[in-house]
């Protein structure tokens, strides 16, 4: 693979490892100067990800990675059903603890249902407003 740095230098070599910050280890590296007039051969080099401008990866490597990802997915869930692939398909019918269903079941046992807010306590105006003692 070829790696170009922000300062213009290029590193061409075999990828050994890469991490989440795009820090890269290369082996059998040929380094080219910014102007392209000087070359260095190195057995190994480490490139910090924050210095990378871009990477050029051969198409064969990208195809291999795609095939590997597909084979791992098939090995993980070979009998995966289509309805299990979406999050919403697993939820059917009313769920315990969901808002409107719980309110309806609680209000079904009350004699008096208020429109919003807690049910009124007792009967009559004086008691519902709270009588001073």
Image: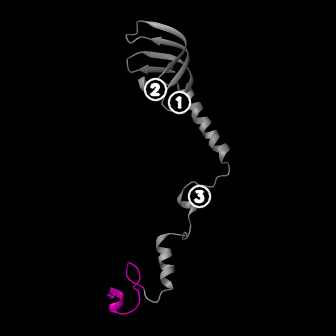
Between 22 and 117, the one nearer to me in the picture: 117
Q: Which residue is mark 3?
A: 83
At 42% across and 26% down in the image, what residue appears?
Answer: 50
Q: Which residue is mark 2?
A: 49
> Mark 2, mark 3: which one is toward the viewer?
2
Task: Judge whether 109 appears above or below 37 on screen.
Answer: below
119 in the magenta segment = yes
Quote the CA–CA distance across marks 3 and 1. Answer: 35 Å
- Residue 41 appears at what percent x and percent y? 52, 8
Q: State the SS at label 2.
A: helix
Q: Which residues are magenta?
A: 113-133
- Residue 92 appears at what percent x and percent y? 56, 67
At 61% across and 40% down in the image, what residue appears?
Answer: 70
For the C terminus, give its image quadrant.
bottom left
**Chain-order first, disc 3 or disc 1:** 1
Task: Judge whether 110 appears above or below 46 on screen.
Answer: below
């Amino acid at each position: 693979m070829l790696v170009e740095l922000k300062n213009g230098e290029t590193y061409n070599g075999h990828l050994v490892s890469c991490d989440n910050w795009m820090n890269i280890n290369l082996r059998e590296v040929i380094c080219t100067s910014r102007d392209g007039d000087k070359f260095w051969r190195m057995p190994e080099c480490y490139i910090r990800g924050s210095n990378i401008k871009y990477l050029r990866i051969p198409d064969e490597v990208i195809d291999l990675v795609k095939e590997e990802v597909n084979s791992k997915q098939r090995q993980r869930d070979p009998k995966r059903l289509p309805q299990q692939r979406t999050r919403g398909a697993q939820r059917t019918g009313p769920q315990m603890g969901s808002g409107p269903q719980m309110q309806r079941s609680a209000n079904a046992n009350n004699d008096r249902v208020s429109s919003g807010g807690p049910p009124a306590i007792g009967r009559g105006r004086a008691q519902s407003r709270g009588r001073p003692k």
